[in-house]
């Protein structure tokens, strides 16, 4: 597959938030007033003015407490569900460029009541409440077009972010996974075929704070259990049981 990708190697992330600051600088996004909510994760969530956020999770391991960090932003899906949902309402409100960057245009202002955050499996997009435009990470498509790497990749001091041709990044991701599995058996690559931002987790998913992705997985499970079909089948089963009991008692 052509286009670009980024490897997000969380085993190398030290939570310095250099990527967060670089993203704000490049995209000229203002800082936001926040309050202490008991976490170093700041601001607490993505917003129309924060396209990328380092999420913090405190975890225990070998009798010690430590942090795991998850740099969150649009994963730039290969077949983006947000684009397909928006296309039904306004054609080309969301476009995908030759590098695979999923880009929200000004036409997203015309999407009416459509909730792009709901359409995204990772709950990423946010709407600017003044302009009504939907926004998110742009993959720094303007920088890439000029031969530069994304601002967040450039800023990362530990090499946790690597940008390149998709084939090269996939090979690097698989090689790194092999290396890291020796010391971290639960290491894994997340949704590798479906997204351009490929996450290498050195621990199980539950060891990271992954924003709406976690909630979606949980709710999805319950939705399936409580789907209209399963509910109807369950009620039918109960009716048969009662009737069976009634027949037995009558006999
Ligand atoms: S991660 Fe969400 S916002 Fe980004 S391309 Fe995929 S569906 Fe769209
Ligand atoms: S690629 Fe650009 S827009 Fe996206 S998170 Fe990195 S710096 Fe921000």
Image: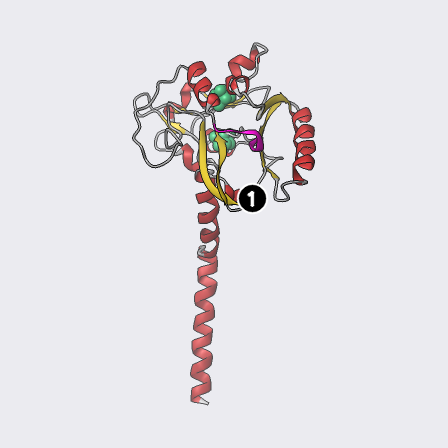
Q: Provide the residue span drawn in magenta.
A: 9-15
At x 59%, y 11%, the residue is 147
Looking at this view, name the residue that lies furthest to the top: 146
**Which image quarter is the N terminus in?**
top right
16 left or right of 114? right
Q: Quadrant of residue 104?
A: top left
Q: How many marks?
A: 1
Q: Is residue 198 visible?
A: no
At x 52%, y 30%, the residue is 75
Quick one: 89 or 12, which is closer to the camera? 12
Identify the element where label 1 is drawn: loop
- Relative to 193, residue 32 above or below: above
Quick one: 157 or 100, which is closer to the camera? 157
Quick one: 192 or 250, which is closer to the camera? 192
Q: What is the image's colouring?
A: secondary structure
Q: Position of residue 96 (x, y in %)?
A: 54, 23
- Mark 1, ligand 1, within 8 Å: the answer is no
Q: Is residue 129 magenta?
A: no
Q: Position of residue 188 (x, y in %)?
A: 61, 40
Q: Is residue 12 magenta?
A: yes
Q: Position of residue 116 (x, y in %)?
A: 42, 32
Residue under label 1, please give it. 204
Q: Is residue 177 visible?
A: yes
Q: Position of residue 8 (x, y in %)?
A: 57, 29
210 left or right of 172? left
Q: Quadrant of residue 40?
A: top left
At x 60%, y 21%, the residue is 163
Q: Quadrant of residue 199?
A: top right
- Relative to 58, residue 22 above or below: above
């Amino acid at each position: 597959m052509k286009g670009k990708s980024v490897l997000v190697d969380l085993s190398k992330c030290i939570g310095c938030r250099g990527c967060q600051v670089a993203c704000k600088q490049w995209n000229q996004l203002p800082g936001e007033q926040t309050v202490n909510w008991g976490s170093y994760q700041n601001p607490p969530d993505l917003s129309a003015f924060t396209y990328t956020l380092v999420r913090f999770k405190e975890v225990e391991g070998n009798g010690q407490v430590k942090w795991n960090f998850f740099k969150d932003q649009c994963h730039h899906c290969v077949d983006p569900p947000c684009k397909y949902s928006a296309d039904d309402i306004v054609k080309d409100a969301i476009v995908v460029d030759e590098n695979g960057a999923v880009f929200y245009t000004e036409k997203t202002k015309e999407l009416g009541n459509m909730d792009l955050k709901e359409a995204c499996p990772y709950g990423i997009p946010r709407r600017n409440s003044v302009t009504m435009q939907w926004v998110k990470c742009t993959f720094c498509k303007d920088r890439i077009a000029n031969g530069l790497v994304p601002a967040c990749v450039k800023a990362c001091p530990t090499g946790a972010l690597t940008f390149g041709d998709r084939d090269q990044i996939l090979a690097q991701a698989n090689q790194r996974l092999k290396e890291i599995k020796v010391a971290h058996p639960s290491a894994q690559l997340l949704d590798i075929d479906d997204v351009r931002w490929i996450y290498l987790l050195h621990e199980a998913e539950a060891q990271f704070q992954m924003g709406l992705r976690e909630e979606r997985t949980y709710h999805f499970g319950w939705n399936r259990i409580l789907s209209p079909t399963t509910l109807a089948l369950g009620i039918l089963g109960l009716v048969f049981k009662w009737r069976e009991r009634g027949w037995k008692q009558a006999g």
